Image (cartoon, rainbow, N blue to C red):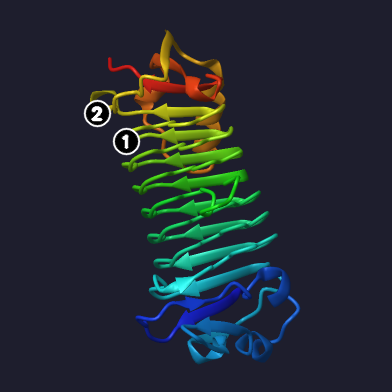
Amino acid sequence: MPLLLTLRTTHSIPLEVEQVRVDTAREQSVDEVRSTPVQYGNKQLTLGEFFDVAGSCADDDEIVWEGDCRQVKLIGSGMTDGRMTIRGNAGMHLGAEMSGGEIVCEGDAADWAGAEMSGGILRILGSAGHLVGAAYRGGQRGMTGGEILVDGDAGNEVGGAMRRGLIAIGGRCGDAPGFNMIAGSIFLFGETGIRPGAGMRRGTILLGAPEKAPMVLPTFKASSTFFPPFLQFYFQHLEAARFSVPQEFRGARYLRYRGDFLEGGRGEILIRQAG
């Protein structure tokens, strides 16, 4: 049986729970887990004042969060191993700076999901907010490894300053995906907002909705139309992770733009061609 944390009631004040981690909780008793410090506004309280605690993650290395946790911030922040499942929504900074393990959010996640993560898998079955996998303000690098898979929509600046890893968004994406991107791969299967790849140095951004593809910035140049062989391997990998890849992506041709030439022109934007 996993360690089960059940939220008793929702609150308007955010609750910060970054000290609840699998690598720590597997060595703790139920009473010790209840005593874990959490930040509630300007007060430091304990986890047991907000959550019912049952079970243990000593055997299966899993923590399950139940309830509407949209005001619960930093779930899985700094995670190194194990698994977390959120049976509902999650607040800001879900999986931020995680380096290993797996997080599955069965609802929606707020802003900064997977911010500056360096490893592991973050799976969001609903939608995500702004700055998925991005660098924090003032930071030099966003995501440097791992995978973020979002079945629904995402907000602005997905993958901002990302260095490595894979981000896949199944639904609509907001403006400026891949802003200041250093390297890595961003696959956007739905409609995308304006200015994709602005300031990107290297890496790949795939835009999958040709009839609604945004105008590419003038600092990018069209180079060829083809099917990149590496996409087939990525699509197989995503399917193995139970992330749906529409059939029309598999045999399609893609218009390749090189850029951003303000940053050397070594990145690429691939736009799926209709028909």
Q: Which of the pair 125/190 is nearer the observer?
A: 190
Q: Which residue is mark 1?
A: 192
What is the x, y in percent for residue 61? Answer: 68, 67
Q: Amino acid at mark 1?
A: Thr
Indicate whether 273 appears above or below 17: above
Crowding at label 2, few (<14), some or many (≥20) Cα neighbours within 10 Å? few
**Which mark sits nearer the N-terminus, 2 or 1?**
1
Marks 2 and 1 in Cβ contact (< 8 Å): yes
Judged from the image, the secondary structure of the residue bearing numbered disc 1 is loop
What's the distance in space between the residues labelled 2 and 1, CA to CA?
Answer: 7 Å
Query: Residue placed farthest to the left in the image?
Result: 211
Q: Position of residue 250 (x, y in %)?
A: 42, 22
- Image-based side of 147 in relation to 249, left or right: right
* Label 2 residue SS: helix
- Disc 2 marks which amino acid? Lys
| Residue 39 position by quadrant | bottom right
